[in-house]
Image (spheres, grey):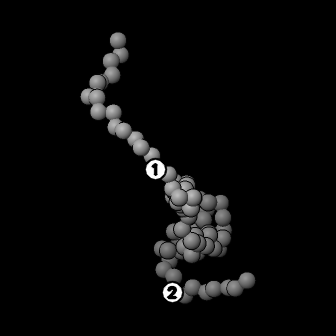
Amino acid sequence: MAAVTIRKLPDDVLRALKVRAAKHGRSTEAEIREILQQAVAPPQKGLGTALYELGQKFGGVELKIERDRRPWRGVTFE
C-alpha cells in the first residue's frame, strides 16, 4: 500500500482529526483513511432513484391517479 505525507497541517486541524477519530473509536490514521475513502467514493444512489431507473429499463409505468377533490374536513375527537 502507498504512504502519503501531509506537510504543513495546521495544529487545530490535527486536533480536530484526533477528536473525530476518538469519537469513532479509531486511530487518527484510520480516521484519515476513512475520510479520504469517502471523499473519492462514487455517490450512492437512494432507493427511490434505483427503483425509478430499474422501472425505466423495462419501459416505465404510467399511473393514472385522480385527485380526491372533496373539501378537507378537520378531525374531531368526540
Q: Is residue 32 above or below residue 23?
A: below
Q: Position of residue 10 (x, y in %)?
A: 48, 80
Q: Considering only vertical position in the picture, is 43 above or below 49?
A: below
Q: Residues within 10 Å of mark 2 (few under 14, many from 20)?
A: few
User: What residue is at 48 percent from the left and 74 percent from the top?
Assistant: 12
Q: Say above or below: 66 vs 9.
A: above
Q: Nearer the viewer, mark 1 or mark 2?
A: 1
Q: Secondary structure at mark 1?
A: loop
Q: Please name the amino acid that badge 2 sits on.
A: Lys
Q: Which mark is residue 8?
A: 2
Residue 58: quadrant of the picture: bottom right
Give the residue type that dot 1 points to. Glu
| Res 40 seen here | yes
Q: Residues within 10 Å of mark 1 (few under 14, many from 20)?
A: few
Q: Residue 57 location, x and y as percent?
A: 56, 62
The mark found on residue 62 in the picture is 1
Task: Give percent across and percent down for residue 78.
Answer: 35, 12
* Relative to 68, residue 39 above or below: below
- State left or right for residue 58 relative to residue 64: right
Query: Could you tell me how far apart the alpha carbons at marks 1 and 2 are, in whole angstroms?
Result: 57 Å
